[in-house]
Image (cartoon, rainbow, N blue to C red):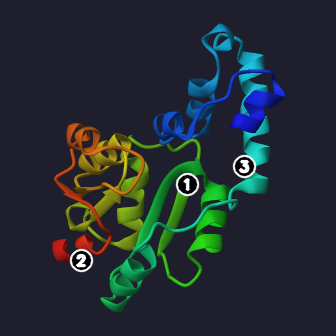
Amino acid sequence: MNSTLRHFGFPVHDLEKYKYFVGDGMENLVRRSLPNSVKTDPRLISRCIEMMRRIYERNWNVKSRPYPGIPELLDALSACGLKMAVLSNKPHILTQRVIEGLLPAWRFEVVMGECPPVPRKPDPSSALGIASRLGVEPAGFLFLGDTATDMKTSNAAGMYAVGALWGFRNAEELILGGAKKLIAKPAELLELL
C-alpha cells in the first residue's frame, strides 16, 4: 500500500498502523490508508484500489511466511484427520495463491477469499457456506482468527471463536470482538480440541 501511496504523492504509514488498516478487505485497506482530503474522490479511490491490487498480486510473497508454530500445528491437525478451511477477506484468487505458495504441504478442504456477491467477513455467509460444504454443523467449528472481524464472524455463524494473540491485534480487541478463548501460541489450539 505504501508503494501506491508514494505513486500518488501521499504520505506513507508504518507497520503498526497497517495492523489496524487490514482485515476488512482490500478496498477498506485502501480507504483507511488514504489522506482524509481525498477520501471523497471515488475515481481516485478506484485507481488506488486497482494499483494496490496489481502491486499485491506481484509482491504478496515478499517477506511473507507462516507464523512460527503454524507448520507444526497444521501437521498435528492433519494427523488428527480434522477438516481444515481458510476464510479470508483478501480477494479469492490471491487467497488461493497465498495458501498454495505458503502452505502447500497441507490439505485444506476449502480455501475462500472475498467472492462477491457473497459479503465479506464479518458477515457470516462465507463461514456458513464453508460449514455447509464440509457437512459440519457450525457449532462443530473452531474458528481461529486474529482480528475482531474474525471473532464477530465466528460468533455470527455460531462457531467457537478463538483469538490468536500472535497476529495483528491485541487481546482487548479480540475479547471485545467476542473471542471465547485466547491463545498465545499455535500449539495451544490442540488443547482446545
Which disc, if any, is residue 190? 2
N-term-proximal mark, 1 vs 2: 1
What element does badge 1 sit on? strand
Q: Nearer the viewer, mark 1 or mark 3?
A: 3
Residue linked to disc 3: 56
Asked whether 29 or 185 is in front, the reply is 185
At 79% from the left and 45% from the top, the residue drawn is 54
Residue 159 higher or lower than 169, as above or below: below
Residue 174, quarter of the rendered image: top left
Q: Earlier in the sequence, mark 3 or mark 2?
A: 3
Q: Residue at x 22, y 53 (%)?
A: 158
* Left or right of 15, for residue 182: left
Name which residue type carries label 2: Leu
Horizontal and vertical percent position of residue 90? 58, 49
Real-space Cα distance between discs 1 and 2? 25 Å
- What is the x, y in percent for residue 24? 49, 38
Q: Residues within 10 Å of mark 2 (few under 14, many from 20)?
A: few
Separation of residues labelled 3 and 2 (CA atoms): 33 Å
Q: What residue does disc 1 label?
A: 113
Callouts 1 and 3 close, C-beta under 8 Å: no
